[in-house]
Image (spheres, rainbow, N blue to C red):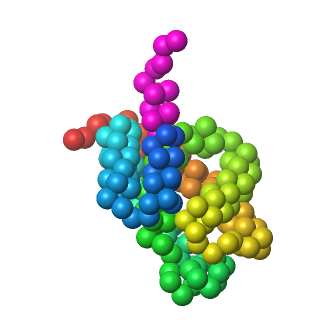
Amino acid sequence: MKLDVLTIKLWVNILAYQLCWWLLVCLGVSALSVVTVILTVGFYLVTESGRWAKWAMLLVVTLTGIGCDSALAYLGIYGSHWQEQGIALWLYLLWPVFATLLNVSLKWFQNHLVIASICGAIGGPSSYWAGAKLANIAQLSLSTLLILALVWLVLTPILLSLCRFLFRFETVANKEGGEQC
């Protein structure tokens, strides 16, 4: 069985995200988890096409995610523990790693936004629930999980659409203006 470069890149992206998720959830902000996050984001930046689109996505997704998590914590959606303590730093570090998925392993969803919404509404809350359980953070209530499902139902297609737009815009701009160093 011969693997092409895109298939290898896809699997590296998926496995690197999962490794970062597990390390951050189980170890918190440790030297190993931070180095793994840096290597994962660095690998994405080196291997992903697009000069400014990939940086824009990293910035926008990270700030959007941190903003959403902070707002939900401030409003007490995650419970009193996170409202008083604030969001755990390890959760902030997951957002740039999540950004690396949008134009690599989740790229197919860019043209299937309804399916992406449904998967986001299931996968997003599931990830928070599992993370909270493994990190021994206060149990997330059913109402919290439903709010997270709604947030991810909306957020997933927005981020995927933005990613598709930025990478296509950069490609068109490069073709019209010529490649510039």
Residue at image x 51%, y 46%? 18
Check residue 44 for magenta coloring.
no
What segment is highlighted magenta in the picture?
Answer: 1-13
Residue at image x 22%, y 41%? 181
Q: Is residue 12 visible?
A: yes
Left or right: where does residue 66 sit relative to residue 51? right
Residue at image x 38%, y 43%? 44
Toward which corner of the image does residue 127 lie, by quadrant? bottom right
Number of labelled discs?
A: 0
Give the residue at the far top of this rendering: 1
Left or right: where does residue 64 sit relative to residue 142? left
Residue 14, image x and y in percent?
51, 40
Residue at image x 30%, y 36%? 178
Give the residue at the far left of this rendering: 181
Left or right: where does residue 91 sit relative to residue 140? left
Residue 72, image x and y in percent?
61, 77
Residue 49, image x and y in percent?
38, 38
Residue 110, image x and y in percent?
61, 43
Comparing 81 with 53, the one in front is 81
Q: Is residue 176 visible?
A: no
Against 95, is 73 above or below?
Answer: below
Check residue 2 for magenta coloring.
yes
Toward which corner of the image does residue 77 lie, by quadrant? bottom right
Q: Main secondary structure of the magenta part?
A: helix
Against 94, is 36 above or below?
Answer: above
Against 24, is 48 above or below?
Answer: above
Left or right: where does residue 72 sit relative to residue 36? right
Comparing 79 with 122, the one in front is 79
